[in-house]
Image (cartoon, grey):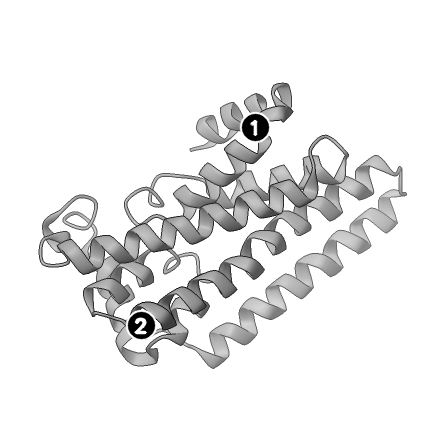
Amino acid sequence: MEQLTTEILTFLRTHPEMATVVIGLTAFAESFAFVSFLFPGFAILVAAGAMAGAGLIDPVAAALAGFAGAVLGDAISFWIGQKFGHVVPNTWPFSRHPEALERGVIFFKKWGWPSVFVGRFFGPLRAFVPLAAGMCRMPLVPFYVANIVSAAIWAPALLFSGYLIGAIAANGWSIEWKAAAVSAALAAFAGLIWLARKIFKAE
């Protein structure tokens, strides 16, 4: 995965005009149930945010691309769950990792539609809850509300965390101020994740 991450980021640095395409596809892959096992989307999105902070790519376009890719990834996973849910457990990668799908189903059955929103912020569940929601016949309107709202928070938040790092590096702050700002950003992000876990603890 490190090799793939390096190659994608190298391409992004040498072809910044392709940033929206790369970021959109990355957010899609991170959210799509059948690819997320193998794709280092989280690291790529943070690094892309750092490039935006350094002025190499447009931050607004990057955020919109990440949002669109995340919505589409969840939507297709949901559709597959609706149409082909009966064969999904016997299909790769879930035939080799049945616990991933099982966790998604348990989480959805316990929390209902809010699980689609909250699941976006849990790495092990992000791509599997929408698939489970489709398998469990979740109504379309609540699904898309949770999908769109969570993507509108998740993608910009990841990019902004990298943006902050890139902006700090580009503006020549001292090492102490850089460390303090990055630590504060990471602490805030970790606090949000901790709060979500306390409220919606997966069992």
Element carrying mark 2: helix
Question: Residue 168 falls in which quadrant of the image?
Answer: top right
The spot of residue 158 in percent (x, y) is 60, 51
Q: Amino acid at mark 1?
A: Leu
The spot of residue 119 in percent (x, y) is 41, 65
Q: Amino acid at mark 2?
A: Phe
Q: Check residue 107 in the rendering and tell me which mark sits there, or answer none.
A: 2
**155 to 9, vertically: above or below:** below
Tell me the quadrant of the picture where the N terminus can be found: top left
Q: Earlier in the sequence, mark 2 or mark 1?
A: 1
Question: Residue 34 falls in which quadrant of the image?
Answer: top left
Residue 22 shown left or right of residue 90 in the figure: right
**29 to 134, vertically: above or below:** above
The spot of residue 22 in percent (x, y) is 51, 32
The spot of residue 160 in percent (x, y) is 67, 51
What residue would you read off at disc 1?
9
Q: Kindly identify the residue that appears in the image at 32 percent across and 42 percent down.
A: 35
Element carrying mark 1: helix
Q: Are there few (<14), some (14-19), or many (20+) residues within 10 Å of tag 1? A: some
Residue 105 shown left or right of residue 85 in the figure: right
Q: Kindly identify the residue that appears in the image at 9 percent across and 58 percent down.
A: 86
